[in-house]
Image (cartoon, rainbow, N blue to C red):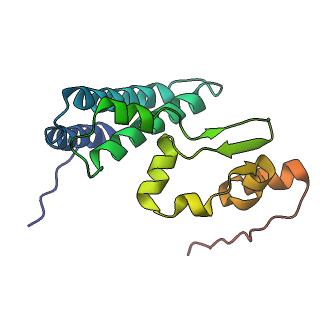
Amino acid sequence: MVILKKVYNPQKELIRRYRLELKKRLGRFRNAHVRRYIDACYDQAIEFTNNYYNATLETSPLLGFYAVLNLTKVHIIINSASKTINMNEVNKKFRTHGASSPAIEKIRFSKNGTFIEMAKYYYSNFMSIVPKEITLRQLYKNFVELNDIYVRLYEQVSNFIKVGYLAD
């Protein structure tokens, strides 16, 4: 039997339900500092997201980045096999986000960091398939979402074919 419930604010309802699930899972962790850290990351992610929608174009990408960064930390810790993780391990894992920019045109990936840990969670061989460094040109060229920038900025032909459909 399916029960449907009408909600007036789906975003708030989703956040509320996720918070309830998070509270259940937090109880499994033995270290109180880790539990508080996860809780704080979640609260910050929600605040960054709420402020993202009201921010200017100049600041909204940064707020969105920090919202995703904090939710990624929550996801990694909550889904880790170790329920005895301590703050030293957490700090080591999340010391950096995993990418740096030694020059304006290059992005260098480290062996650890928040987003690297997330990628390892989903792809065990992630470190063997990712280059140590990538240029912005390569990034724009090889990601469909960024390819329009590549075509305009470098005046090159797209690697992708635009496909569309017509509605009846």
**Residue 141 at x, y = what percent?**
77, 58
Compared to 59, does 12 lie above or below?
below
Q: Is residue 19 visible?
A: yes
**Residue 73 at x, y = what percent?**
39, 39
Residue at the far left in the pictured view: 1
Closer to the camera, 85 or 4? 85
Compared to 24, does 46 lie above or below?
above
Q: Is residue 53 visible?
A: no
Give the position of the C terminus as an image quadrant: bottom right
User: With 130 as the anchor, is 106 left or right in this view?
Assistant: right
Residue visible at 56% across and 41% down in the picture: 98
Compared to 77, does 124 lie above or below?
below
**Residue 12 at x, y = what percent?**
29, 36
Compared to 76, does 30 lie above or below?
above
Residue visible at 73% across and 51% down in the picture: 134
Residue at the far front in the pictured view: 88
Residue at the far right in the pictured view: 155
Closer to the camera, 7 or 143? 143
Residue visible at 43% across and 60% down in the picture: 122
